[in-house]
Amino acid sequence: MGENDSIGAIARAVRDACRLVVLTGAGVSAESGTPTFRDAMTGLWASFNPEQLATPEAFDRDPELVTRWYDHRRLGCMACEPNPGHRALAELERRVVGSGRSFLLLTQNVDRLHQRAGSNAVVELHGTIMVWRCTKTGREVMPPPTPMSEYPTRTEAGGLLRPCVVWFGEMLPESALEAALSSLGECDVFLSVGTSALVQPAAGFVFEARRAGAVTCEINPQDTAITGWIDHAARGPSGRILPAIVEAAFGDGAAA
Ligand code: BV8
């Protein structure tokens, strides 16, 4: 199936969907230049394995290093802008919800670019790098767009500030997982965008969607761990493919 055929098939699916669930990963932010999970390992971070930094044990072992890494990524995300892929997903939500159908965007990303692009129905499966909390009281703060004053950052309560992200080995927020699983259990179209589908439990969401009888679609420049369970795969960057899908589904030349 050529790229245009896949775009047409996915456009017809999302146009006719009654309950559309979208899952995104770091790839949807790649064209925004956000220091993704692995890119953030360039330069100063080249000698560290991300999975060794994104764990509670790493923070306990070296809070200064982990705080520096997350503050570096936080400021990097703030300096980036949503790309046409983020904006197309916000338009898709408006179109689906505007015609009385249900839409939910499940993101593994922590950069809040979906919200900055205008998406409202967003579930942050892995939390966000923009909010930090005290390790002692759990009190949350949104640090300003300037580097932290000290590494690690002590709180008045005598704890340390940590990012409100889900580290490897930590449970996902119960409300987020509940919202995701209940929407997957009744969706009729599932669209995976920009994820390698290697991180659990999000990697298993395609199976929940298939169990519900959904049509499954994927947008990614390359095959992923779930491509074998995908009905329609469009190969290319989401910043180009997503706007083409929304145009084909709802534009003047809407998919027949
Ligand atoms: C949990 C926040 C209970 C932090 C992140 C079952 C089996 C095996 C392992 C496990 C399991 N259950 C749990 C685990 C352990 C672990 C896990 O999955 N490990 C993996 C490595 C095997 N999971 C957990 O610990 C989860 N907790 O399940 O609790 C439990 C715990 C322990 C044991 C049992 C049960 C918590 C996981 C959350 C981790 N936190 N983020 C931070 O950001 O620092 S995950 C982190 O990785 C990011 O969220 C990021 O999203 C994710 C990486 O995945 P992707 O988003 O897919 O990004 P990736 O770079 O891999 O791929 C990008 C894709 O984009 C590629 O396909 C590329 O081709 C494509 N792309 C590139 N350019 C573009 C593009 N696509 C479109 N357009 C483009 N332009």
Image (cartoon, grey):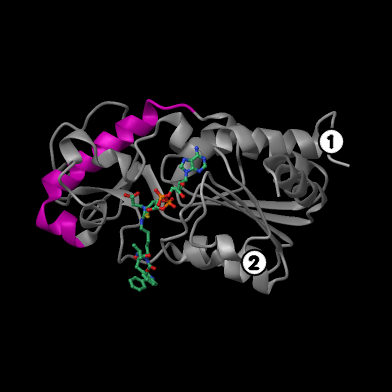
Location of residue 202 in the rendering, given as x and y in whole percent from the top left corner = 48, 62
Q: Which quadrant holds residue 74?
A: top left
Q: Is residue 28 left or right of residue 47?
A: right
Q: Secondary structure at mark 1?
A: loop
In this view, 211 is above or below 183: below
Give the quadrant of ligand 1.
bottom left
Q: Is residue 83 left or right of residue 18?
A: left
Q: Secondary structure at mark 2?
A: helix
Location of residue 130 in the rendering, given as x and y in whole percent from the top left corner = 37, 39
Read off the magenta span: 57-81
Does the stretch in magenta take in 49? no
Location of residue 52 in the rendering, given as x and y in whole percent from the top left corner = 21, 56
Looking at the image, which is closer to me, 197 or 18?
Answer: 197
Question: Which residue carries the number 2 mark?
Answer: 209
- Give the residue displayed 51% in from the left and 48% down from the top: 222
Task: Mark 2: give few (<14), some (14-19) or many (20+) Cα within 10 Å.
Answer: many
Task: Mark 1: give few (<14), some (14-19) or many (20+) Cα within 10 Å.
Answer: some
Tell which circle, 2 or 1, labels the residue nearer the N-terminal end.
2
- The answer for how far apart the CA atoms under marks 2 and 1 are is 26 Å
- Give the residue displayed 48% in from the left and 63% down from the top: 203
In this view, 52 is above or below 97: below
- Give the residue displayed 53% in from the left and 39% down from the top: 114
> In the image, which disc is placed on residue 153?
none
Location of residue 147 in the rendering, given as x and y in whole percent from the top left corner = 22, 29
> In the image, which disc is placed on residue 254?
1
The extreme bottom residue here reads 211
Does the stretch in magenta take in 65? yes
Which amino acid type is marked by label 1?
Ala
Mark whose residue sits in front, 2 or 1: 1
